[in-house]
Amino acid sequence: MPDREKIKAATAKIFQDMASAMAVGMVYVGVRTGLFRVMAGGGAMSAGEVAAAGGLQQRYVEEWLNGMTACGYVHYDAARETFTLADEYAHLLAADDSDHFAGGLFYMAPPLLGAAPKVAEAFTKGGGVRFDEFGEAGADALDLINRGNYRHRFAQYWLKALPEVTAQLEAGAHALDFGCGAGQVSIALARAFPASTFHGVERDAASLARARRGAAKAGVGRRVEFFPDLAAVSDGAYRLLTICDCVHDLARPVEALGAARRKLTEGGTLFVAEPKAGDSLADNCNPVGAMFYGFSLFHCMTQSLAEGGPGFGTCMGPARLEKLLSEAGFRDFRQLGIKSGVNNFYAAAR
Ligand SMILES: C[S@@+](CC[C@H](N)C(=O)[O-])C[C@H]1O[C@@H](n2cnc3c(N)ncnc32)[C@H](O)[C@@H]1O
């Protein structure tokens, strides 16, 4: 029989975890309906004021405010019957498209947990849930999670770790983003380096269409183009190859990375951004690691296994990445010293 005190502690943890899961759903609703934006900087507001400012149904808003108060995001003044969104949560959840916007993470919850029954089935049957089965909601979430960083940090901070690449992009060069999703890397870099051209390759039709729409909206013209397949772009043409949040997803990684490598010029550089993870389970037993194992089970790993891939999963540490890149023919692998709470960065040469 387990220790009574330990059972009590485990019970408390189970309720805390379930409360956190419900908080995720409530934060998702707050981001999606604009409630955080409505309350940001608004000071103390009654439920009626919040509902009116957001143009939302009052009873839903009241219950959301109650829940967000219980979760600690909102302060309730019982005497005045007002709710105040804490400034730090406004900073993280009301600033869409900034590099400190954390709201995109919460967009992952509905598509990922929606896939949970199919993932559970795959435990017995094998296979998995394909990338396209996560639909627009999955693509939306990925776009929202990453685009603030790509817009505000990629050229301004991350690429500074490769000064020779930055200098060539400033002078005018070609860059390729493989597995480009919504195309935000190419669009951001095109804005930062007006003398250069940026191509993206994305095999998911909905994401490719999203990337093309994004480029048209950004007004970057013919300097940014997106293609469905690596075969559509020239070998030996690109000074920089970027692969962001993608290597661990690949179904045929050595083949795909080898084909991508051939797109680089002699002396071309690979830049990889991957979720922040270490090589051992012990390295990843922290809140970010726990979140990534969930992302992995319900998205990254399962979509690779669905295609008969290796299912590396989200927490692919540097040692496995180095081995993979070396098998694909890359050399001079190194981890870049760019600080981030959620990403590791690497470079290699063709
Ligand atoms: C997790 S998403 C990341 C998207 C984007 N790079 C970003 O950082 O937001 C991984 C992307 O890689 C794409 N992908 C996976 N395998 C691919 C392949 N063999 N060829 C092209 N795209 C691929 C997926 O369709 C998906 O859009």
Image (spheres, rainbow, N blue to C red):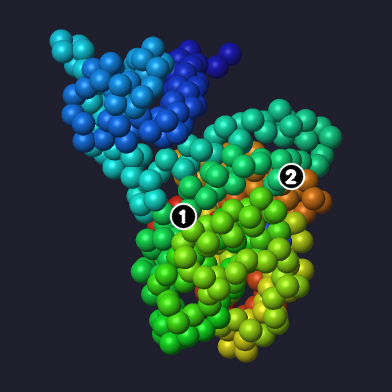
On residue 130, which mark appears? Answer: 2
Disc 2 secondary structure class: loop
Residue 283 lies left or right of residue 263; in this view the side is left
**Which of 276/78 is in front?**
78
CA distance for labels 1 and 2: 23 Å
Q: Quadrant of residue 136?
A: top right
Q: Is mark 1 within 8 Å of ligand 1?
A: yes
State the residue at coordinates (49%, 80%).
Answer: 196
Q: Nearer the viewer, residue 157 or 233?
A: 233
x and y, in percent, of residue 77 in the image:
19, 16
Residue 299 place in picture, x, y as percent: 64, 43
Q: What residue is pinned by disc 1?
A: 147
Q: Nearer the viewer, residue 166 or 216?
A: 216
Bin the neighbour count of mark 1 within 10 Å (Cα to Cα): few under 14, some 14-19, many 20 and up.
many
Q: Type of residue at label 2?
A: Arg
* Count of numbered badges drawn on the protein: 2
Q: Residue at x 22, y 22 (%)?
A: 45
Please say whether residue 345 is visible from this viewpoint.
no
Residue 332, by quadrant, is bottom right
Please, what is the three-letter code of the amino acid marked with disc 1?
Arg
Element type at mark 1: helix
Ligand 1 quadrant in view: bottom right
User: Neighbour class for label 2 at 10 Å: few (<14), some, many (≥20)?
Assistant: some
Residue 122 shows up from this direction:
yes
Q: Check the image and name the residue furthest to the right.
A: 125
Q: Residue 201, percent across and down?
A: 65, 66
x, y percent for residue 259:
73, 74
Q: Quadrant of the C terminus?
A: bottom right
Q: Nearer the viewer, residue 14 or 118?
A: 118
> As drawn, is 79 to the left or to the right of 130?
left
